[in-house]
Amino acid sequence: MEHRKIRGNVIDIHVAIQGPSDGPIVLLLHGFPELWYSWRHQITGLAAQGYRAVAPDLRGYGDSDAPAEISSYTCFHIVGDLVAVISALTENKVFVVGHDWGALIAWYLCLFRPDKVKALVNLSVPFSFRPVDPSVKPVDGMRAYYGDDYYICRFQEDGDIEAEIAEIETERVMKRILTYRTPGPIIIPKDKSFWGCKDESIPLPSWLSEEDIAYYVSKFEEKGFSGGVNFYRNFNRNNELLGPWVGSKVQVPTKFVIGELDLVYYMPGVKEYIHGPMFKEHVPLLEEPVVMEGVAHFINQEKPQEILQIILDFISKF
Amino acid sequence: MDLTFDHSFVKVNGIKMHVAEKSPSVVGNGAFDGVISRPVILFLHGFPELWYTWRHQMLALSSLGYRTIAPDLRGYGDTDAPESVDAYTSLHIVGDLIGLIDAVVGDREKVFVVGHDWGAIIAWHLCLLRPDRVKALVNMSVVFDPWNPKRKPISTFKSFYGDDYYICRFQEYGEIEAEFAKVGTERVLLELLTYRNPGPILLPKGKRYEDPVSLPSWLTDYDVKYYVSKYEKNGFTGPVNYYRNMDRTWELMGSLSNAQVKVPVKFIIGDQDLTYHMPGTKKYIENGRFKSHVPLLDEVVVIEGVGHFLHEERPDEISKHIHDYFLTF
């Protein structure tokens, strides 16, 4: 595996690359609060099958640059980084695999630059989070539905959640989030009860080792969480800027997978969207969505071989 | 007179947009009304103008069977002018226009587009972001400017032309508005609309505007009164905010880096236009780079002896260019 810095949208992006240099590129986009490392199983699996797996740390994360201003984390900045990374590596279209925020960014990449994406495998976040009328402020809707302690609402105020996390050990924060399996919204009351008692250890599932946790902890301790949280602070601004794409369809062949216990599956309207006609209406080249039984949000880490196989089976068609 | 145009307001992209329209009159007993769909031309004005700048083309082309639609862009005339200075990026304006196109032809159809000055810049971005909504484009005065990570707009203008360059002078919120207020709306508009110097517009602080301005043949007292009435009502902040968002737009448009304009285009410019004399423009047109970024660039027309407001200076010629081109689709 190779680690490299590539010039993104006027910043430097760290990428992990593995696979033959002439292999078709598969761009793997992590979510929050993760890193390129979340794709470790798929990277080696794809490389072994002759693909060139490319997994960046998104802007604000890990070994990539993290600009200070919140306004530098709109979906346009992030897509801009990825367009630059793709262009630096190839003139051809690439395969894209996205999870969580990476999936949302992947939807936008397909909207803005269908000329860059051959096919898409998206995990967890469906296209129900598509551009709508900018007079709708998404965060206000979430606040009205779930209250002020809803994690996305807690993330809005600059410095707020960072201060709370600073009082909890980073290791506890990572373990708490990565092991979250409740099929419902993440509510973080201000009394810090969400993080559990200092004396209570958080047991790790079979698919997550102490070494894995240590890697995440080392990077997030170095970088902090602001970069990743700044993505959420641009929800309303993104919607304002996405006006040109209201009503625009995703014209890229797409495979969508979600875990049955994923908190996203329980967000308002999501189940109906995934199983109803609108998902296919907005993404005409969508294959039948897959709901994986007994699996929660971090699906690419919880079921690495199954997800790898789904990716390989799908992209081998193109 | 104004009365020959139909005026309406459309809710788009979170704002209320004023739209002027001139369409072929429907004659008949109504049996086929609405069944025959007429091609639509969307006209995009520049600075410091309004929908009104397109009056000649709208009259000429509607009589040839087109529905002609000309909005006041966001911040201008009778369209909303949001308070926040950062609500004037290209993404906002293109969002407005997608909403307008949806309202006029539904969300599946395409329109013809004609752009000039800022309207041309917006038209390039509209074609980059939503080529699926534009059938063909006639763009005027401002060539395509591909995104360049090394060329942040305002610092680039500053290094080329200095601090007195009008775009640099427009940056500080409220500053140029106060100066314009001192000079007077009519005088400011006259200076800008009659500008024929092929060099850059420089506005040193404390510049005096004392020499008499004579109206060119193509600008009447009535025209000036119309512009003045709208600009006096709303001021210059909305329009100037576009310039205040050039750097912001640049930051956002990195996602469209190296994207080609995939819409058929005819480009027209006057050889006395200040934009024609900006460094690199002539070469950009002549050495093939323009065509490499706009592969469907069908024709470039350079009109001799014509300045920046070419569609007002030579209305019939421009209307003919537009009709001749759109006929081929």
Image (cartoon, rainbow, N blue to C red):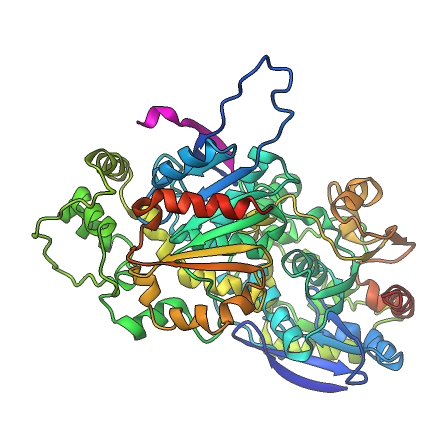
Question: Residue at (82%, 52%) from the top-left corner?
Answer: A286
Where residue A289 appears, as percent x and y from the top left, is 86, 51
Residue A74, image x, y percentages: 55, 60
Quarter of the image holding residue A310? bottom right
Residue stretch in magenta: B1-12
Residue shown at 87%/66% (left/top)? Answer: A307
Residue A229 visible in the snapshot:
yes
The answer to whether any part of residue B147 appears in the image is no
- Residue sitting nearer the eye, A16 or B36: B36
Residue at x-position 60% and y-position 15% = B30
In what quadrant of the picture does the N terminus of chain B appear? Answer: top left
Residue nearer the viewer, B258 or A181: B258
Q: How many marks?
A: 0
- Residue at (54%, 45%) from the top-left corner? B326
Q: Indicate whether residue A35 is drawn in magenta.
A: no
Residue A219 screen position, x and y as percent: 65, 78
Q: Quadrant of residue B17?
A: top left
**Which x, y percent locates residue A296?**
83, 58
Near-viewer residue (B237 or B216): B216
